[in-house]
Structure formats: structure tokens, C-alpha cells
Amino acid sequence: MNKKQLLKPFQDLKHEIDKLKKKHLVQGLVDKFHAEKKSLEKRIEKTVSDEMKKAKKFMNEQKKELNKIQKKVEVALKKKKSSSKKKTTTKTTKKAAAKATNKVAAKVTKKKASSK
């Protein structure tokens, strides 16, 4: 056996160790990437949940404002309807009263004319 044949297994082992070292570095990088990925996912989830909370709060505020406006509009419509009903009622009563006075006046004049 010569020297090269004896050193061959050691050199193979050295190459295997170098490959494992490289794999270990690659694995370390992969681990770093996974850790960074997890931290980014957490940030994204937090940001999304914060934005969702803001959006819900905004929607609730807008809903409250719309309800206030709707109540004001309903009150205004009720006032308008009630005032228009009062106007028509007073107009009809005035007309009826005018007709009644005209009839009474006509009867009174007829009675005066017939009694003379």
C-alpha cells in the first residue's frame, strides 16, 4: 500500500465534512429565513387586525351618524305631514263654516221675505 491509497479515505472524509459544513451553513440560512418569515407573518397579521379594528370603528361611527340623520329626517317628515294635515283640516272647516253661514243667511233672508 502506498501513501496515496492510505490518504484516499481521509481525503474522502475531508470532502464529506466540507459538504456537511456547507449544508450546515445552508441549513443555518434556511433557519434564518424561516425565522424572518415567521416574524413578517406576525407583523402582517397584527397590521391587518389593527386595520380591521380601525375599519370596524369607522363603520360603527358612520352607522351612528346615519341613524342620527335618519331620526332627524323622520322627525321633519312627521312635522311636515302633521302640519299639512292641520292645514287641510282648517281649510275644510273654514269652507264648511262658510257654507253653513251662507245657508243660515239664506234661510234667514227667506224667512224674512216670506214673513213680509
Image (tube, grey):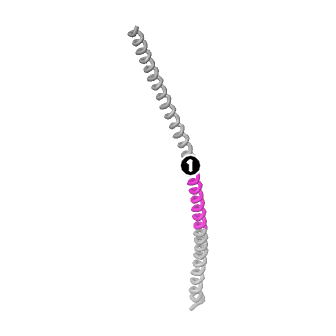
Q: Amino acid at mark 1?
A: Lys
Residue 32, percent across and down?
Answer: 61, 70
Residue nearest the observer in this picture, 100 or 31: 100
* Residue at 45% over, 25% down: 92
Residue 14, percent across and down?
Answer: 60, 82
Q: Is residue 10 above or below residue 92?
A: below
Q: Which residues are magenta?
A: 36-60
Q: Is residue 100 above or below residue 72?
A: above
Name the outermost residue toward the top: 116
Residue 41, located in which quarter of the rendered image?
A: bottom right
* Residue at 48% over, 23% down: 94
Q: Is residue 65 above or below residue 18?
A: above
Residue 102, percent across and down?
Answer: 44, 17
Q: Is residue 56 magenta?
A: yes
Q: Which residue is mark 1?
A: 64
Apparent side of residue 24 relative to residue 115 in the rendered image (left or right): right
Q: Is residue 2 above or below residue 39?
A: below
For the N terminus, the image quarter is bottom right
Q: Secondary structure at mark 1?
A: helix
Residue nearest the observer in this picture, 80 or 27: 80
Residue 12, percent across and down?
Answer: 57, 83
Name the outermost residue toward the bottom: 1
